[in-house]
Amino acid sequence: MKLIMAVVQDKDSNRLSSALVKTGFKATKLASTGGFLKSGNTTFIIGTDDEKVDKLLNIIKDNCESRDQLVAPVSPMGGNADSYVPHPVEVEIGGATVFVLSIDQFNQF
């Protein structure tokens, strides 16, 4: 048994949720916030059998795309301003960060 934790951008959340339902995977969705961009994310928690992990990872990969976005950096508060870049920078956002954990026991009450 595996526990999959997938952190995805909010823009990809509904598409992934629909794909999981269509393929029979049950998931718990948690609202989360990214630390770097301080933007909304959704964390999916999914329990599945070992032999279904590859199928699940493919579903996540197919529904969570990365893209580039211009981001205005936050000015440093009390930090060193020498390394501060005052203009927007392009960063890659989206995609998914996925953790696959082994589970010894699973109970549903």
Image (cartoon, rainbow, N blue to C red):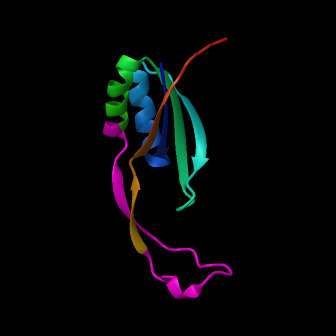
Magenta residues (range): 61-88
Q: Is residue 92 left or right of residue 83?
A: left
The relative height of residue 35 versus residue 42 in the rendered view (above or below) is: below
The relative height of residue 44 versus residue 7 in the rendered view (above or below) is: above
Residue 2 or residue 41, whichever sits in front: 2
Magenta stretch encompasses residue 55: no
Would residue 36 be visible to someone looking at this image?
A: yes
Would residue 23 be visible to someone looking at this image?
A: no
Q: x and y percent of residue 36 in the render?
A: 53, 62
Q: Residue furthest bottom?
A: 82
Magenta stretch encompasses residue 70: yes
Q: Is residue 42 left or right of residue 95?
A: right
Q: x and y percent of residue 75 in the render?
A: 59, 79
Q: Residue at x 57, y 60 (%)?
A: 38
Q: x and y percent of residue 34 in the render?
A: 55, 54
Q: Residue at x 53, y 42 (%)?
A: 42
The relative height of residue 103 versus residue 76 in the rendered view (above or below) is: above
Q: Quadrant of the C terminus?
A: top right
Residue 79 or residue 12, whichever sits in front: 79
Residue 104 falls in image quadrant? top right
Q: Residue at x 66, y 78 (%)?
A: 77
Q: What is the number of callouts on the image?
A: 0
Q: x and y percent of residue 43 in the render?
A: 54, 39
